[in-house]
Amino acid sequence: MRTLSLHRLSGVAAALFVAGAAFAAPEDVAALKSGSLTPYGAERAANKEGTIPAWDGKAPATGGAAGKRSDPFAADKPRLTITPSNAGEHAGQLSDGTKALLAKVPGFKLEVYPTRRSAVFPQAIYDQVLKNATRAKLVNDGLTVEGAYGGIPFPVPRNGHEAIWNHMLSYRGQVTSFVADKYVMTAAGDQLLTSRQRTNLIYPFYDTAGSAEQFNGEWARARIDINEPPANAGQALMTIDYVDNYGKPKDGWQYLPGQRRVRKSPSIAYDTPDGSAAGLANFDDVNLFIGSQDRYQMKLLGKREIFVPYNSNGLMTKPIKEVIGKSSLNPAAVRWELHRVWVVEGTLRDGKRNVAAKRRLYLDEDTWQAVLADSWDAQGKLWKTGQAFTMVAGDQPLATTLSYAWFDLVSGGWVFAGAVNETGGVTYRPFDGKQMNNFSPTALASGGVR
């Protein structure tokens, strides 16, 4: 395993975290402004071998008509194919879950393409990230963010909780809408479309008219309206997420057509199984991890260069029959690249429970979003592995994970969620405040059908 041990993991930084307040060092702030770091906190330079290029800050052209975005790198050809027969030669650049898929899944392989550092964000986001470096801090043993607004809070992370908060609060637009499918594949090779749902996301944390001083701690609202299958059509749910996992991790409400009422739901957080995923993924597995950190102690293991799914516009525009294989996604549809990732390991806090007794998350340095994840069960056995697929929207600009897959290494079943292949693209709109009216329990009730 190739590990990059940077000064961010120093003992001094760890001591500052224990004390409850740690801001970026002056030299790190200087690096963010014009030095060795990008405005988002990634290493600006290429790696020594040249297999990871330098970040140039140029957003690729992807179009954006009707929310659909083209593959800006469609002309690229694979530079390497990793199969079970040569996996050992690349073991240091593979996650445990990827190694397990190579060993267990017939026909699974990695088509590795040239690395394209396509993640670029608006200058207004970069400006807030720089401010956050000197004002954001964690309290309550890493469970609460204070002083952050409008950008990732910790561009130079000193511990696992800071890195995970970057993942949670990473920029995914201001108001985002899409219709997506969820497919479940059994070990026998059966394919089931279990859900088609309209997802609307709003991020008050990124309201350009707001400020850190005015921010009330509510960073996101999500509304999901289920269209299919007919038995579940008309169901809807709404969640609110906060930057305080200590006092108020998540609120949720559900609308059930049969009851014709909205009820507060305590069951859409943590490791509650997602019924439409047939037990293959839980509510905290969305985007590989969207759980409250009050269940885990998060440890920052360092930075690695590993092969991850990336620049997946092509995957999202193909017909679904060309994407889903019998035992995994079609290897020809998935683009893998070598990237630097922060590795964070979560272990259960004393007295807490979750079916995933240990998690390991791989956060892309350029977006701060998890692109791979591994989960272990209570017996210490590697149980599931997840992959998240990054879409590039040069018109915004932004890069964000959208579709994701979880593979059960024990049962052989797997789920592919957030698939927009047959439903269209993703629409982004600016935050104007009025949209909040659509993200309330009252709106959930008035929008219910049947």
Image (cartoon, helix red, strand yellow):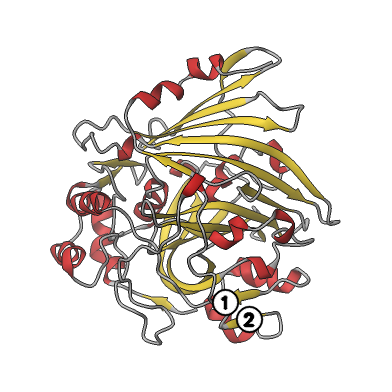
Left or right placement of residue 86 versus residue 244 in this view: right
Q: Say whether marks 2 and 1 touch (CB < 8 Å).
A: yes
Residue 364, picture quadrant: bottom left
Residue 112, picture quadrant: bottom right
Say what amino acid the circle numbered 2 marks.
Answer: Thr
- Which sits earlier in the primary sequence, circle 2 or circle 1? 2
- How crowded pointer 2 is (Cα within 10 Å; few <14, some 14-19, many 20+) is rated as some
Residue drawn at x 52%, y 63% as measured from the top left: 71
**In terms of depth relative to the viewer, which is nearer, 65 or 296?**
65
Query: What number is the disc on residue 52?
Result: none
Q: Can you say which quadrant of the picture contains the C terminus? A: top right
Mark yes or no: residue 375 visible: no
**In terms of depth relative to the viewer, which is nearer, 130 or 10?**
130
Left or right placement of residue 61 versus residue 140 in this view: right
Above or below, comparing residue 350 to residue 269 in the picture: below
Q: Position of residue 60 (x, y in %)?
A: 40, 64
Element on which disc 2 rests: strand
Q: Position of residue 203 (x, y in %)?
A: 38, 37
Left or right placement of residue 279 versus residue 239 in this view: right
Residue drawn at x 57%, y 62% as measured from the top left: 314
Q: Residue furthest right?
A: 188
Query: What number is the disc on residue 81?
Result: 2
Label 2 to label 1, Cα distance in Å?
Answer: 6 Å
Element on which disc 1 rests: strand
- How crowded pointer 1 is (Cα within 10 Å; few <14, some 14-19, many 20+) is rated as many
**In terms of depth relative to the viewer, which is nearer, 97 or 424?**
424
Residue of label 1: 112
Residue drawn at x 66%, y 47% as measured from the top left: 422
Mark yes or no: residue 18 visible: yes
**In terms of depth relative to the viewer, which is nearer, 403 or 250?**
403
Q: Position of residue 207 (x, y in %)?
A: 29, 36
